[in-house]
Structures are given as structure tokens and as C-alpha cells.
Image (spheres, grey):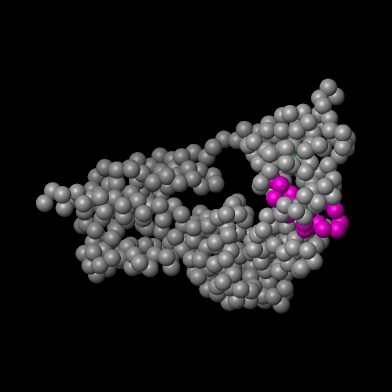
């Protein structure tokens, strides 16, 4: 066991052996998850696939990424085809995957690599980090997995594994540097990419946040926290304050000829350039209106339509704050013109729009509410 300032105290039980890369790699050879961007044995990974998967996996679970990865590969099988796509097409294909800055950066990165690197990703971590959307973790992951360079990507999963393996008492986020150093020190010069993926698999499938499956862990004998018996209490963390709840209103206008009123968000900030239904600002002190004209200042074509307020709000949680939207619905006559800066889009063409998850929820909620109102109306007749 290496000497560290955060090592468990003397009276605590200690493992008899130190964790090593070879043990983890032997486990990986028989237990690796089969994923479409991975190769086995001596086959060479495709840097485009590795990069695409790493961008999609940022803050997102593997199961969620799989269908998007397949869709992107079918549509843009290589970097050049993605670079030649229009940004709206990429945003639209990304819709539902969240963290939309990633899609814009993905496209910008494809264009940069195509224009400045003749379509080939650089191998070096530092050079990869200069590309749009590639931070320290992703650069290390691509460098190690796609090119076999000695690099160590460290995310929350790997921090958790390291903190348990060495029973690191220092609290996150201050402990980040120490945890990254521990992971880097364990990384072998040979098979660095497999080591990175083995750590990712271990963190995702065995050393999970709750109830880690220590009895089937390849490092069971050498894990300091497991030997002490308090592995679930790691990593130590400073309690963080939750973002304050923001509220707002969403206005869903459906035209009688099956069109919905939409607009495009500003090209900077949260959900930049994505599609949305018109709505209010989102703020902590928003008060939902009970009056019938929440969009009273909407331009003339829609100034006099009748609004209904859906009984239930729509909730969504962003990284930094939870959001609660009051949904108002209205029906407009066929062929009503859209106010300036907005457009009517056929409901059946919604799949082509870059709609973020929160807006999908709003529209689904409004359509369900509209359906119930219609049935009530019919029942009264
Ligand atoms: S023994 Fe348990 S706590 Fe330790 S690394 Fe393995 S799964 Fe995690």
C-alpha cells in the first residue's frame, strides 16, 4: 500500500496487497462490456467512433447513448460527412440527448478536424484539448483509447473507484487532483486505452455509487475501503447547495389544421439555438397567471385567442436548477399567421425539430390536456 497523507489510520484494517493494473486488465479481458465503439484484441479503434461516443457519453448513460450513436453513424458514417452536415440537422438528430452545447461543439470539432487536420484527429492530449468540445477527460480518453497513448481520463466514476481503493479522506472537489494522480500512477504504458475502459466499466457496473458489488470486484483483496468495510461512504464530499427552483410559463398554440407555434432560442446560453414553444422568462420569483391572456402582448394574429391553463405543471431538472413550467394551451383558426420571430410547424413534422427534452414534455403535456378537454366537451353535448 503506498504512503499517502490520507491513508487510513493505523488501527484500521489494511489490505495485504496493493491494487495493480494487471489484475484489472485480466478482469477486463473476460468481462468488458460489448459496445459498438469498442474493438477487441489487436483490432485498431476508429478515432471517429471513439470521439463520437466520448462526446455523447459526457453526463449521459451508455443505454441512452446507444441509439443516438447508431443513428449518427448511419447518417454520418465518417468525420467528413458530419463536417459537411448543416448544424440544424446535427442539432435535430441530437434532440433528446441533452446538454446541447455538445452537439454544436461536435459539429464545430468535425469541421475543424476536417479543415485543419485533413480529417484526422491529433493523437496528443494537449492538441486534442484545443478542439471544440474536448476537455481534459475527453482528450485523455481519445488519446488513450483511439491511439494507445499513456493518458488517464478521470471522471466521477473513476474518482469514486480511486477514493475507495485508497480510502482517500480528502473531500471532493478538493480531492480531484489527488484522485487523478492516483489513477495516473496506476496507468500502464502498454494498453492504456484498455486500462481506461476497464476503469470505466468497473465504475459503471461494479463499483457503483450505492451497493458496490465488492464480492465480484477484481480489486476486492486490495481495496482499502472494502477491507475497512466503509466503502459506501466514499468518496468524501463537501455538501453542495441545490440550485434554486425556477418557474415560468409555456404557451402551446395549436392551429386547427394541425400546426404548432414554435420559435428558435437565442444562439447563446442555455439550450442555445434549440426549438421551443413561446414562453416567459424562467425565474425564481415567477408567478403563474390565472388570467386568460398570458400572452397578451403577443402580436396581432394571436392577440384574441382563448387560453386554457393545464391543471398540472411540467417539471424538469437541468444541471444547475430545477424548473417548473405552467402550460397554457390555445387553439387558433387554420392558416393563422405566426407572430414575428415564430413559425407554425406541422405537428407530424415535430421529429425534424431540435426540441430539447423539456419542450417535448411541455408539448406532450399540452396535447394530452387538449385531448382531455375535447373529450369533456363531447361528453357535455
Ligand atoms: S472492492 Fe468494492 S469498493 Fe473496492 S473498488 Fe471494488 S467494488 Fe469498489
| Residue pictured at 77% horizontal, 58% vertical | 193
In percent of width and height, residue 185 lies at: 85, 47
Q: Which residues are magenta?
A: 187-203
Judging depth in this view, the residue of 214 and 155 nearest the camera is: 214
What secondary structure predominates along the stretch shown in magenta?
helix
The image quadrant where one finds ligand 1 is top right
| Residue pictured at 82% horizontal, 37% vertical | 222
Q: Work out whether residue 157 can be spotted.
A: no
In percent of width and height, residue 301 lies at: 24, 64
Q: Against 250, is 171 above or below? A: above
In percent of width and height, residue 200 lies at: 70, 50
Q: Is residue 289 left or right of residue 9?
A: left
Q: Work out whether residue 167 can be spotted.
A: yes
Q: Is residue 193 magenta?
A: yes
In percent of width and height, residue 69 lies at: 58, 64
| Residue pictured at 46% horizontal, 57% vertical | 356
Judging depth in this view, the residue of 329 and 347 nearest the camera is: 347
Amino acid at each position: 500500500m503506498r504512503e499517502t497523507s490520507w491513508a487510513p489510520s493505523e488501527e484500521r484494517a489494511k489490505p495485504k496487497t496493493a491494487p495493480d493494473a494487471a489484475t484489472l486488465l485480466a478482469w477486463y479481458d473476460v468481462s468488458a462490456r460489448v459496445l459498438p465503439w469498442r474493438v477487441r484484441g489487436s483490432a485498431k479503434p476508429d478515432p471517429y467512433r471513439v470521439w463520437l461516443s466520448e462526446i455523447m457519453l459526457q453526463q449521459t448513460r451508455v443505454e441512452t447513448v446507444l441509439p443516438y450513436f447508431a443513428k449518427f453513424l448511419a447518417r454520418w458514417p465518417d468525420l467528413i460527412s458530419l463536417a459537411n452536415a448543416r448544424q440544424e440537422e446535427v442539432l435535430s438528430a441530437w434532440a433528446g440527448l441533452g446538454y446541447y452545447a455538445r452537439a454544436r461543439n461536435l459539429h464545430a470539432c468535425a469541421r475543424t478536424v476536417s479543415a485543419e487536420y485533413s480529417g484526422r484527429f491529433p493523437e496528443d492530449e494537449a492538441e486534442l484539448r484545443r478542439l471544440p468540445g474536448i476537455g481534459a477527460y475527453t482528450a485523455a480518453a481519445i488519446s488513450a483509447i483511439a491511439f494507445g497513448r499513456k493518458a488517464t481520463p478521470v471522471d466521477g466514476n473513476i474518482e469514486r473507484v480511486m477514493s475507495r481503493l485508497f480510502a482517500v479522506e480528502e473531500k471532493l472537489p478538493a480531492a480531484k487532483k489527488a484522485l487523478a494522480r492516483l489513477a495516473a500512477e496506476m496507468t500502464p504504458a502498454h494498453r492504456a486505452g484498455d486500462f481506461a475502459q476497464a476503469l470505466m466499466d468497473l465504475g459503471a457496473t461494479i463499483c457503483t455509487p450505492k451497493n458496490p458489488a465488492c464480492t465480484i470486484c477484481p480489486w476486492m483483496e486490495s481495496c482499502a475501503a472494502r477491507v475497512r468495510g466503509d466503502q459506501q461512504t466514499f468518496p468524501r464530499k463537501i455538501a453542495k447547495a441545490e440550485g434554486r427552483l425556477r418557474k415560468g410559463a409555456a404557451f402551446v398554440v395549436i392551429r386547427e389544421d394541425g400546426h404548432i407555434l414554435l420559435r428558435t432560442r437565442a444562439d447563446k446560453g442555455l439550450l442555445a439555438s434549440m426549438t421551443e414553444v413561446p414562453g416567459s422568462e424562467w425565474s425564481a420569483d415567477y408567478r403563474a397567471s390565472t388570467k386568460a391572456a398570458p400572452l397578451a402582448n403577443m402580436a396581432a394574429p394571436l392577440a384574441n385567442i382563448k387560453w386554457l391553463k393545464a391543471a398540472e405543471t411540467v417539471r424538469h431538472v437541468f444541471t444547475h436548477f430545477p424548473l417548473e413550467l405552467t402550460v397554457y394551451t390555445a387553439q387558433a383558426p387554420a392558416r393563422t399567421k405566426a407572430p414575428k420571430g415564430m413559425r407554425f410547424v406541422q405537428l407530424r413534422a415535430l421529429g425534424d425539430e431540435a426540441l430539447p427534452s423539456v419542450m417535448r414534455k411541455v408539448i406532450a403535456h399540452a396535447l394530452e390536456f387538449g385531448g382531455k378537454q375535447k373529450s369533456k366537451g363531447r361528453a357535455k353535448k
